[in-house]
Amino acid sequence: MSEATLRLGAFLGVLALLLAAERLIPWQVPRPLGWRRWLPNFGLVALGAVTVRFLMPLAAVGAALWAQSRGVGLLNWLEAPAWLAIPLTVVLLDLLIYWQHRIFHVVPWLWRLHRVHHADPEMDASTGLRFHPIEIWLSMWVKIAAAIALGAPPEGVVAFEIILNAASLFEHAAIRIPPRLDAALGWVIVTPSLHRIHHSEREEETNSHYGFCLSVWDRLFGSWRGSWAGELVLGIRGYRAEREQHVLPLLTQPFR
């Protein structure tokens, strides 16, 4: 099975499970726009995939294959065995995405790109796909550089990409996890209730909980809050109107 087929199958499987879960164990918060946000949210990720496909010479997995064939990168130099190199790649790339996410909140022009993701006035699994194509393109360059510098095994990069996509869908899902289970999971991974804090309109809450998969990075680097204060209001002021939830306004939003 090819890497692209494996990734697509995993993505569709996780998405289908979460869409079903959103109906079976829904987060009890009104979502008036609901599925009407799906077309633009899915449209952005499709445009991002096209941007990467046609404007980049190779993706992160291709970079890892190139580095492996030439013995480039830290893990190749150390001749790390696969049982160590693959999980280490997943953990270190997750740490990299944590810091990338944090930087996108700090640098003004990067925030304008990332704000498209935060401007979703509701949250469900489709929100985990809502990233501006330029942000997707920039993120791929970061992963390419990391894959080469680390000498990441291609299997580790594939595993990370699958986990990252699944984690993004899961943590944005409009599902209700029993509190005790949610608390237990939250010690290891980012759960929907933890990530919702990050989508609050309050700046101090938006600038917290940057983790995508492992929750340990927020605890280690001082960006952990644990809960939101008062009523949780999602989105960005000035961008909640339905007219803003279409592909063209989302594409032009960073430049307006």
Image (cartoon, rainbow, N blue to C red):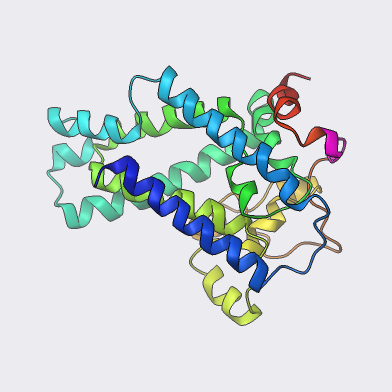
| Residue 92 in view here | no
- Residue 222: image quadrant is bottom right
Residue plotted at (67% across, 45% down): 38
Q: Name the residue: 33% across, 44% down.
A: 5
**Image quadrant where one finds the C terminus:** top right
Q: Quick check: is 179 in the magenta stretch?
A: no
Look at the picture and state if 76 lies above or below 247. below
Residue 239 magenta-drawn? yes
Residue 53, visible in the rendered structure: yes
At which x and y percent is residue 24? 64, 73
- Residue extending farthest to the bottom is 180
Q: Main secondary structure of the magenta part?
A: loop
In this picture, is 117 found above or below 52? below
Tell me: residue 133, above or below residue 83: above
Q: Between 167 and 36, which is closer to the camera in this rendering?
A: 36
Image point (48%, 42%), residue name: 97
In the displayed structure image, the side of residue 85 where residue 16 appears, left or right: right
Q: Position of residue 191 (x, y in %)?
A: 58, 64
- Name the foreground residue: 192 vs 44: 44
Which one is in front, 136 or 249? 249
Q: In the image, 167: left or right of 144?
A: right
Residue 66 falls in which quadrant of the image? top left
Estimate the x, y position of residue 188 in percent, counting from the top left.
Answer: 48, 67
- What range is drawn magenta here? 237-243
How many marks do you count on the picture?
0
Image coordinates of residue 187 in percent, x first then y, are 52, 70
